Amino acid sequence: MFKSLSKLLTFLSVVGVNLLLCCPTANSVDFPKKPIKLIACAAAGGGEDTEARGIAPYVEKYLGVNVMIENQPGAGGKIAFEKFQRTEPDGYNLITYTFPKSIIIEYMGKTNYRTRDFTPIFAWSRSNQVLVVHVDTWKTFNEFLKAAKAKTLAGGLSGRGSTTHLAGLVAVDELGIKVNWVPYEGAAGSTAALAGKHLDFTICLATSALSLIQAGKLRPLLMFSDKRDPYFPDVPIPKDLGVDITSLPGVRGVEAPPNTPISIVKVLEEAFSKAVKEPAFIEWADKRKMVLHPLSAKEFSKIVVDTYPKVEQFKEMFKE
């Protein structure tokens, strides 16, 4: 059929090119084909839920399918985490929460999931914990600390197993003070109680106290962070005051079930990465005083690994 070797090679090369043009490559993936469910491990209206709903429309733009938010509150997220551990890793079920509360819950007792097994996709924001008091009380952190060492104060603790739970326990331990903790389901309850003067102070995510701070009812005294929050530039951090307090900022992002294929991870990661750069989303985040802190799947994965030993050193506190 072919009169020379050169003609045969030419024919084969043409066939090869056509096959490459017509067939998907080994790295391509036909995903997604249907709506994606994004599970928020908290009730509607909270920070986790709000941020999920805020970014979802922009992710839809790049995925070409709907992203539906499903709230699964309960036991601080433990119920949702355990169910997620067994979810099919096809990319159609994702989860969002304030990391590292999943690791904190692991150290609080027996769980049927492991955060290290989840598949990090992308993280978009970071929120620091802040100590706030009623405006009619202390004006500076040093005034507060002096009072806290003189008597036992009542502190609001929101969300057992949350990042705030850990921040509160660590702060009290490292400051050498005693506190009568009053538990609340979330920051909304503790900040409202503080505004009503039923507490001496509370510790919560900065964004959770924002509205009451802006209303002139609460005063932020200390931001638990290694650097000042751009939306609260006048609030000091521990090193400004010469105190040493371990800080673990709350990171909000999205993860897929264990063993999700890398091809699907890359599609999702790219969509979230583009969504967080959308001018309209950036404007929305700015209005909420939300600190955007994009992390790739690789960077998010490293944070998970690095956080385990940081939380483990405080595990005995969770048993009290």
Image (tube, rainbow, N blue to C red):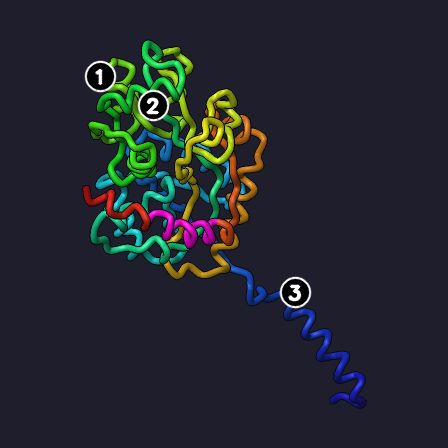
Say which mark, if any, is on residue 145.
2
Q: Is residue 11 above or below residue 116?
A: below
Q: Quadrant of residue 26?
A: bottom right
Counting residues from the start of the chain, the first of labels 2 and 3 encountered is 3
Q: Residue, x 41% and y 35% (percent of image)? A: 244
Pointer 1: what residue?
Answer: 198
Dot 3 amino acid type: Leu
Q: What's the mark number on residue 21?
A: 3
Between 270 and 33, the residue placed more toward the observer is 270
What x and y, as percent, mark residue 108?
23, 47
Between marks 1 and 2, how big is the CA–CA gap? 19 Å
Which one is in front, 310 or 194?
310
- Frontmost of labels 1 and 2 is 2
Depth check: give the residue in front, 48 or 320.
Answer: 320
Q: Are marks 1 and 3 in contact (CB under 8 Å)?
A: no
Badge 3 marks a residue whose secondary structure is helix
Residues marked 2 and 3 touching at CB (< 8 Å): no
Specify which label sits upstream in the sequence, 1 or 3.
3
Mark-to-mark CA distance, 2 and 3: 69 Å
Magenta residue span: 300-311
The quarter holding residue 211 reads top left
Q: Is residue 70 visible?
A: no
> Foreground mark, 1 or 3?
1
The tag earlier along the polypeptide, 1 or 2, is 2
